[in-house]
Amino acid sequence: MVRDDEVEVLIVGAGATGLTLACDLQRRGVSHRLIDAAPHGFEGSRAKGVQPRSAEVFDDLGVLARLESRSTLYPPLGIHLGPVTLKRTMIALHDATPDVPHANTLLAPQYATDQSLRERLEELGGSVEYATRLGAFEQDADGVVASLESGAGTETVRARYLVGADGGGSTVRRGLGIAFEGTTDESDRMIVADVAVSGLGRDRWHVWPRSKGRFVALCPLPGDTFQLMLKLRPNDPADLDTAAVDRMVRDVVGGSKVRVHDIHWSSVWRPNIRLAERYRRGRVFLAGDAAHVHPPTGAQGLNTGVQDAYNLGWKLGQVLAGAPDALLDTYESERQPVAARVLGLASGLYAHLGDRPLAATKRGDEERQLSLTYRGGPLAPGDLDAPGLQPGDRAPDSPVVLDDGARTTLFDEFRGPSFSLVAIGDRAAEACRDLSWTSAGAPVRMIPLDGSSNEPFRRFTGILGDGAVLVRPDGYVAAIARDSLDDVRDWPALPVFPSS
């Protein structure tokens, strides 16, 4: 049991990753503290793409509607080549489908994503402790003791688990001594800034791909500012003064009337492309940029961190409720390979900025992160190449008719911190109702479907007769029964549940 002066989880870092984890733990009733060394929330645009899979996460957490109100869809590119401007689609627009209701990448400045998550956390009853820095920490068999430093002084807190979501320079990762493999090119620098611009239309993401050794892009953000990406030459000073930035931009743009007037936020970015050797050491975990840092191309970094948190949150909740500790080892097993893949994708796109800048503007379905799977991992062993929906795959949405005739969608039924047990047909429903589930941890919600309809669900799952699908709290398939219901009786014994 946790004493009154303890918390179950201490989260270090209140960016999108830490906030996502805090929201998930808060709705699960897991006691936690979320601290951040900064005096307030992040104010820049930096990571500005929210992919469809992350939109599904935010929908489940109750964040998506407010984020959409602060977002737009990506505009087409306007590629300026001397007197000629080419129109090009970088991020294609998609129609929503029954299985993918949130089909498009949102253009959402990072400050809007963080604000939306922070508001949701407060709505759930949680908060962020800003201007609070992690000092030394040590762990034993039962928990972690950490020193916290704030304006009120130094305090010691004991937690069952600690999660470092504190960015690329992670204090937690350094304290654990975990290697951060990869490269940093100090000679390759880019100014990233939120700027006020005149003389430029807001219907395009304007790109000057190659001019005098520089690359300039100006993307219209929701509201009235642009995000500037200005790739510097090796000998250029990294001068963030408004006049200096305006001068460098006009040097690339040429004789146009484009002017930079104000800088609301700015930074100098270097291609720091790294992956942590481990995501867990004992009772301490790494998530988000503390575990992997990405180039800005492809809008992968923030999204990968959000999904780290979504994977880890329910597992922490289950283990705290009595599930096997080995469940927490599956966090690294499932998420580290994903980070490695998306790092390769984003790094390849970034590499083209120098040698083939137009190729760097190409985006496809892989960046949307809907096809990421945990097949072959510890919670989804089996044939990696098996056709159709399999354990470890993202559970698709679908319009469905319940056995009482009510019409809804799977995502509406999945929403919340529970497992979902979808049964179609009378025999499947009876078999699932006979199961005995533990009362500890995340509940299992039964979703009985009418067996005489639900053609989209049958098409997406490959269930032709009576069958059932068990869906994890993070929206991935835990188990599926198509041809036989015999295995269903074993589902309560899966290693994701506490012992009865």
Image (cartoon, rainbow, N blue to C red):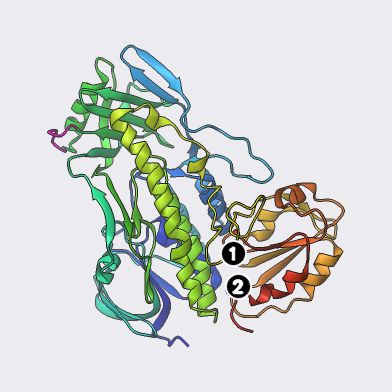
Q: What stretch is highlighted in magenta?
A: 233-238
Q: Residue at x 25, y 70 (%)?
A: 175
Q: Which residue is drawn at 51% across and 77% down?
A: 319
**Residue 409 - label:** none
The location of residue 87, given as percent across then percent down, is 45, 20
- On the question of residue 122 being in view, the answer is no
The secondary structure that dominates the magenta segment is loop
Q: Disc 2 versus disc 1: distance between alpha carbons?
A: 8 Å
Say if the magenta span includes residue 495.
no
Return the residue nearer the eye: 33 or 421: 421
Q: In this view, does 410 lie to the left or right of 79?
A: right
Decide: is 48 above or below 485: above
In the rendered structure, are the residues bearing label 2 and label 1 in contact, judged by CB atoms less than 8 Å apart?
A: yes
Decide: is 168 above or below 88: below
Q: Name the residue under label 2.
A: 442
The amino acid beneath tag 2 is: Ala
**Residue 473 - label:** 1
Residue sitting farthest toward the top:
83
Return the residue nearer the eye: 209 or 126: 209
Question: Where, by quadrant of the figure, is residue 78 drawn?
Answer: top left
